[in-house]
Image (spheres, helix red, strand yellow):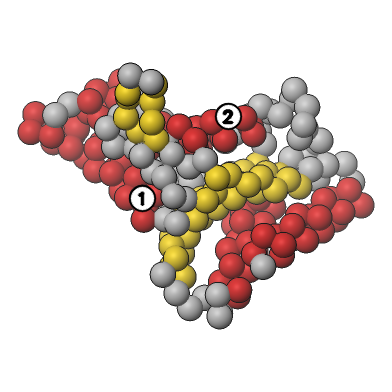
Amino acid sequence: MTTILQLNTSLFGDGSQSSRLATEFVDALRRASRGGSGITVIRRDLSAQPVPHLTAERFRAFGTAAGERTPEQQRFVAESDELIDELRRADVVVIGLPMYNFGTPSTLKAYFDHVARAGVTFRYTANGPVGLLTGKTAYVFATRGGRHAGTPRDLQTAYVRQFLGFIGIDDVEFVYAEGLALGADHREAALGTATTRIAELAA
């Protein structure tokens, strides 16, 4: 049994190019597994179900001992625990990642802030932090209006790769569809290249 966690992060939900590519990849994985036999898919749309941005109250709740939490703190921790449980169950993590003003959607940052919990998804050691969510593979479908991959303007790739590695997910594959705002020909070519890469990865 393989569990896939699909995170759609676009403001435009399922209608966005990043979400469509992520779904295309998940569907390709299911077809490659005898029509989906043995595959469970968890989908979380951070536009339809946004994670609250981190506040001081939420941060304090994460660091408060279980027996000392107020009812509000218990609710905050339960929301975080639900997200972490989905990640922990997943063998494969698929992220649809648009670029907004050179960075990641703020909803994804909020999600990351809620799943980075000391002693739960990572721990501190004498040699530095160690991620605890190991043994997973992540696929990131990055869509951009311009062309940024491999340049100093690509502030997404290093950040997302570093965060996933921080919680133990070191096997990360990026698939880019760039130049989507540069005209129909550029968009068609970029999406075609991404679709070809999806077929290769799912095979």
- Image quarter where the C terminus lies is bottom right
Name the residue located 78 percent from the left edge and 61 percent from the top edge. 196
Measured along the vertical axis of the image, is residue 46 above or below residue 74? Answer: below
Position of 191 with respect to 7 (left or right) is: right
**What element does badge 1 sit on?**
helix
Q: Residue at x 79, y 43 (%)?
A: 178
Amino acid tagged 1: Arg
Nearer the observer, 60 or 25:
25
The residue that disc 2 covers is 159
The residue nearer to you, when weighing 21 against 184, is 21
Q: Is residue 127 visible?
A: yes
Residue placed furthest toward the front: 127
Q: Position of residue 139 (x, y in %)?
A: 59, 50
> In which image quadrant can residue 180 be found?
top right
Task: Say few, some or many: other residues with alpha carbon within 10 Å of mark 2 (under 14 / 14 to 19 / 20 or more).
Answer: few
Residue 145 in picture, x, y percent from top left: 78, 39
Distance (Cα) linking label 2 and label 1: 21 Å
Image position of 192 (left or right of 128): right
Res 27 visible: no
The disc placed on residue 88 is 1
Of the numbered discs 2 and 1, the one sitting upstream in the chain is: 1
Name the residue furthest left: 67
**Is residue 125 or residue 198 the one in the foreground?**
125
